[in-house]
Image (spheres, grey):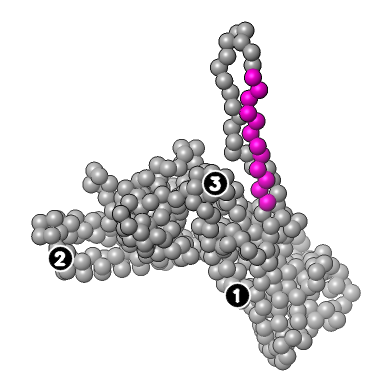
Amino acid sequence: MPSIEQQIKEGFDKLATDFETFKKDNDKRIERIEKSGANPGDREEKLAKIEQALDAKTAEIEKLQAALNRINQGGDETEGKSKEKATAEKKAFEKAMRRGEASLTPDEQKALSVASDPDGGYLVRNEVSAEITKKIFESSPVRQFADVVTISTNALEEPADFDEVSSSWVGERSSRATTDTPELQNLRIPTHELYAKPKATQQILEDAAVDIEAWLQSKVVDKFARDEAAAFIGGDGVVKPKGILSYAAGDAWGKVEQVASGSASALTADGFIDLQNSLLEAYQANARWMMRRATMSAARKLKTGGGEYLFALDNSIANGFQMLILGKPVHFAADIPAVGAGNLAVIYGDFRQGYKIVDRVGISVLRDPYSAKPYVEFYTRKRVGGSVKNFQALKILKIASSL
C-alpha cells in the first residue's frame, strides 16, 4: 500500500487534472454565454459534476493530511516520564473514574495528587490532554494558525501599541516642540469555561474492557472542537471567546476592516484582489484565506483581468500540497457564513499575528454519581479565551447587498 505522502501526492495530481478539465469547460461556458447571452444548461451540468469531483477529492486529501499530521506529531506518550509512573497514573485515573475517589489506595491517591484540581475532580493526564488538544487543532483551522498560549491565571493581559510617535524636521538652531506620545492599549483576554458532560451506566464502568480515558476523549473532543471553532470565528465574547467576525468594521483599534465584494450577493475576482491588497505588506508573507467549503466552488470560476484563474494548486512535497488563491493557501472553516447578500464570507490575513488563543492549564474531570442516577456523569471542563490582538493583520470580505 502506498505511503500517506504518496497518496496525498496522487490525490493532488488527480485534483490538478480535474481542475484543468474544469477550466477548459468553464472557458467554453463563458464563451457560449458571451455569444448567446444565456447560460448553456448542458455545460452547467457538466461543470457541476466536475465540481463535485473536485470537492470530493479535496475532502479526501484533507483526511490524509490530517492523518499525516497525527503521525508527524506523534511520539512516545511516556516521553520524559517513566513508563511505570505513567502506567500508575493511568490505572489510578481509571479507578477513580470507575469507582470514585474513595476506592483509591494511598499509593493511587499519591499517583494522582499532582493532577488534582483545586476546584474539584482531577486534571486529565497530560498525555490525554495533549491528544485532545491535537484533535481540536485538526478540527479548528483558527487554532491551527493562531497564536496559542497557555496560562495559569484567569486572563491574559498584555500591552498593545499601534500608535506611532510623531516626529518633525527641524533646523540646527530651531526650537524643538514636544511631539505627540503614542498611547498603549491594554489587551485583556479572559478565559471562559467550555464543558462537556457525558454519562455512562455503572455497568459499563464496571466492564474492564472499556477504556475510560479513550471513551471520555471520544466524547469530549467533538464537543470542544465544534464549540471552539464556532467561537473563534463568530463568538460574541460573552462567556465565550470573541470571534474574528464579531468585531465592528473599520481600520482602527478594536475594529477589523471589511472590504466589499464589488457585486451584489456574489464573489468577484476584484473583491479577492482588493481584499488581498488591503493587507499591509508586513503581513503578506504568512497570510492565508479562510472560508467555508461551498465558497470555494464559486471562487474556482473567478479570473483576473488578464484571464488567469485566481485558484491554483501547489502539488509540491516541499510546500506540503496546498490549494491557493492569488498565491496564498486556502483553508476551510464551516462556521464562516456562506456567500450571500451582506454576509462576511472570507477572512484573509496573518492569523498568528492577528488572533490569540489563551488556554487555561489543564482539562479537568469531576465524577458525579448522584445527579443523574443510575448514570454516572463526567463533568469535563476546559477554560479557553480568544481575541483579535492585531487589528491590522486580518481583513474580511463582505458580500455586497446591492451595487
Which numbered dot is residue 40?
A: 2
Q: Residue at x 62, y 73 (%)?
A: 220
Q: Amino acid at mark 3?
A: Phe
- Quadrant for residue 205, please give it: bottom right
The mark closer to the camera, 1 or 3, is 3
Q: CA distance from mark 2 to mark 1?
A: 48 Å
- Give coordinates of residue 122: x percent, y percent: 77, 71
Check disc 1: other Cα within 10 Å, few if <14, some if 14-19, many if 20+.
Answer: few
Q: Is residue 262 above or below residue 383?
A: above
Toward the left, the furthest residue is 36
Depth check: 69 or 288 in front? 288
Q: CA distance from mark 2 to mark 3?
A: 44 Å
The residue beneath circle 3 is 391
Residue range of the region highlighted in magenta in the rendering: 177-188
Check disc 3: other Cα within 10 Å, few if <14, some if 14-19, many if 20+.
Answer: many
Which numbered dot is residue 218?
A: 1
Q: Amino acid at mark 2?
A: Pro
Q: Is residue 259 magenta?
A: no
Q: Is residue 178 magenta?
A: yes
Q: Main structural element of the magenta stretch: helix, strand or loop? A: loop
Q: CA distance from mark 1 to mark 3?
A: 36 Å
Q: Is residue 188 above or below residue 39?
A: above
Q: Quadrant of the C terminus?
A: bottom left
- Give coordinates of residue 297: x percent, y percent: 33, 62
- Give coordinates of residue 27: x percent, y percent: 19, 55
Q: Amino acid at mark 1?
A: Ser
Q: Residue at x 46, y 62 (%)?
A: 336
Q: Residue at x 13, y 55 (%)?
A: 34
Please tell me which of labels 1 and 3 falls first in the chain.
Answer: 1
The mark closer to the camera, 2 or 1, is 2
What SS does tag 3 mark?
Answer: loop
Q: Quadrant of the N terminus?
A: bottom left
